[in-house]
């Protein structure tokens, strides 16, 4: 990977912009693709920071308008300069080795994206199934209540589920009203 200057910071940086289109299934939504890209971007920078540390740098940071320049930071808290490359063979070697590691990380981006997108799509499909199951609960409860009311009607009052031997007219009105209110509540939950 070639290092190059970045105009907004002092020192040398690696261009880590990913210019290739990431393949995704047609069934993936734009929102799923964006979530996968964001997760991969965060994971990539985490891995790049760990890589910087393995090469003797304190950390690395992103800079530039699009955040596509990676600067390794030395123990003296400054980025690597051309002067360092010319006069500090150890720092130059660590910087170049870090760049090679970044190049390998860049090669992993398409596979990281595909894996992450697949996980997101599976999670979303599972969530959709769970949401559909939960949404059906009120309707199932209302149907069960109707079944209970239908089954528990020994009285000849004509009110399903009153459960009494005989009902007065005022009791029938109250039973109907209460049953309608409960059913309305269950129906409202389903909508």
Image (spheres, rainbow, N blue to C red):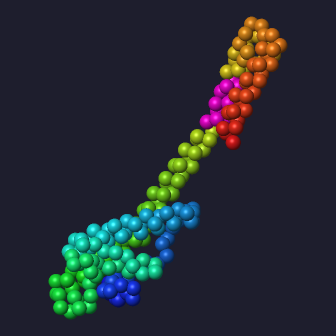
Q: Residue at x 23, y 75 (%)?
A: 57
Residue placed at 22% from the left, 89% from the top? 85
Residue 141 x, y percent position in the rendering: 64, 30
Rendering coords of residue 153 (x, y %): 73, 14
Extreme-right residue of the structure: 169
28 relative position to 62: left or right: right
Q: Residue, x 42% and y 77% (percent of image)?
A: 67
User: 177 left or right of 72?
Assistant: right
Task: Give the total number of marks visible in the rendering.
Answer: 0
Q: Which of the 4 image quadrants contains residue 159? A: top right
Question: Measuring 39% from the left and 79% from the top, which residue is drawn there?
Answer: 63
Quadrant of residue 178 within the rendered picture: top right
Q: Nearer the viewer, residue 130 or 64?
A: 64
Q: Which residue is at the front of the view, 4 or 28?
A: 4
Q: Is residue 78 above or below residue 115?
A: below
58 lies left or right of 186: left
Question: What is the chief secondary structure element of the magenta stretch?
Answer: helix
Question: Considering only vertical position in the picture, is 124 above or below 8?
Answer: above
Residue 57 is a magenta residue: no
Q: Residue furthest top?
A: 165
In the rendered image of this protein, does residue 84 appear above or below residue 114? below
Q: Position of residue 1 (x, y in %)?
A: 32, 84
Viewer can see residue 103: no
- Asked if the magenta segment contains residue 146, the reply would be yes
- Residue 90: tell me if it is visible: yes
Residue 180 in percent (x, y) is at: 75, 27
- Pick the quarter of the image with the C terminus: top right
**Segment colored magenta:** 137-147
């Amino acid at each position: 990977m070639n290092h190059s200057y970045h105009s907004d910071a002092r020192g040398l940086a690696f261009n880590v912009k990913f210019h290739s289109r990431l393949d995704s299934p047609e069934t993936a939504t734009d929102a799923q693709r964006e979530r996968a890209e964001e997760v991969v971007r965060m994971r990539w920078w985490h891995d790049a920071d760990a890589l910087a540390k393995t090469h003797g740098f304190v950390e690395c940071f992103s800079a530039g308008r699009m955040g596509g320049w990676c600067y390794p930071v030395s123990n003296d808290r400054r980025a690597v300069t051309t002067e360092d490359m010319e006069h500090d063979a150890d720092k130059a070697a660590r910087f170049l080795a870090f760049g090679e590691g970044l190049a390998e990380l860049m090669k992993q981006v398409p596979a990281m994206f595909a894996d992450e997108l697949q996980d997101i799509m599976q999670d979303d499909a599972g969530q959709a199934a769970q949401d559909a199951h939960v949404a059906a609960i009120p309707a199932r409860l209302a149907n069960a209540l109707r079944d209970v009311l239908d089954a528990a009607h020994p009285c000849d009052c004509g009110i399903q589920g009153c459960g009494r031997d005989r009902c007065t007219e005022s009791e029938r009105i109250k039973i109907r009203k209460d049953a309608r209110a409960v059913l309305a509540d269950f129906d409202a939950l389903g909508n």
